[in-house]
Amino acid sequence: MLDSWLLYGANGYTGKLIAEAVGTARAKPILAGRSAANIEPLAARLGCEARVFDLTDAVAVREGLRDVALVLNCAGPFSKTATPMMAACLDAGVHYLDITGEIDVIEYAAHLDSRAKQAGTVLMPAVGFDVVPSDCLARAVAESLPGATHLTLAFTSSGGFSRGTAKTMLESLPDGPRHRSAGRIVQARDIARTRRISFPSGLRQARAVPWGDVASAYYTTGIPNIATYVALDRADAWQMSILGVFAPLLRSKGILRWLQSQVDRRPPGPNDQALQDSRAEFWCEVRDDEGHQSVGTLQTPGGYALTILTALAVVDEVLADRIPPGFHTPAKPLGWQFIERVASTQVMMA
């Protein structure tokens, strides 16, 4: 069984963090991306093999996956990279992981379940901050109330965003919040746009967002009605509010490209101190049609620090053949206790 794995998008903010965090306990990844100027110096510094290929070139992608057992895709926005990489992995019989938080990418992967099983391939998107901790919390709380019909998730995180995350958020703004109603993903019409959430650190005002759990929590818990919220700090909330006003304009590809070019002027992501100090909190509520409810919370390291831990832990699980072929959300095969093992934290039930 091959134990070689490939980290695509290794020169991006999160990809580089993951590449640099790989120690001697696991095989070093092959570092890959579309820019030789960015990938090759990084690979040389870390003592890794480098491969350069663009996902628009199917022949080059096929060659890039030669003798590889698993791909961890860290190249966002995943709306552009996940589809061609998933297709190539299924054709080559290579396991696929990514760190997306995008609803449509998770839904697309779910539709490929049969193909993945036939190929003997694990297909697991969202193995980072989006959505491992919230997925584990959702499963834990759902298991405490069998028969729940509604699930609400919220999170708050300090430390700021990387360029890739900011670009993904821009892409999602024109469609506005989405939620799951009676099993279907719809535009947010019959949920509150804002809610006061009782996080472990106190009450916070949160707003509805189209987060990946709208997709993933459904496959993990089977609960048909799901809404997701985020509580931002004052500066980020103000920026989101301003962008929300102009969200319809973002349907213009020219305006969206211009805004994304402005994102490229920002630092790649949080600095080392912000990365070290960042923390995240999660809140989940489930309820049934009789009015019973159950609530749980979770505190973890911040998004990027946690993504390093969870992504590498899932790589280990897949390479050890502890996850069967097919589409999976993280907590489905790994259990809700996975987050407690990986992040030295604890799910707290109210």
Image: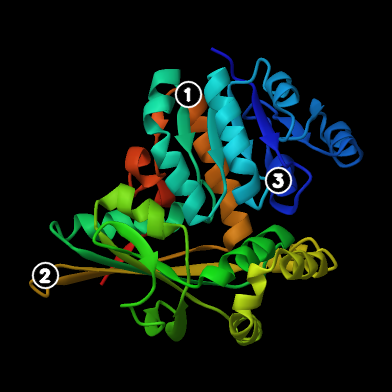
Distance, label 3 to label 2, CA atoms, is: 43 Å
* Count of marks, rendered view: 3
Rendered residue at 58%/21% (across/down): 69
Kind of residue sitting beneath label 2: Asp
Residue 248 occupies which quadrant of the picture? bottom right
Of the image marks 3 and 1, the number of the one nearer the N terminus:
3
Q: Nearer the viewer, mark 3 or mark 1?
A: 3
Picture coordinates of residue 145, whole percent (x, y): 16, 61
Kind of residue sitting beneath label 1: Ala
> Looking at the image, can residue 297 be seen?
no
Kind of residue sitting beneath label 3: Gly
Task: Say which residue label 1 marks.
Answer: 320
In the image, taking residue 343 as reference, residue 144 lies left or right, namely left
Rendered residue at 38%/81% (across/down): 197
> Looking at the image, can residue 234 be seen?
yes
Is disc 3 placed on a helix, strand or loop? helix
Rendered residue at 82%/63% (across/down): 264
Picture coordinates of residue 207, whole percent (x, y): 46, 80
* Position of 93 relative to 30 (above/below): above
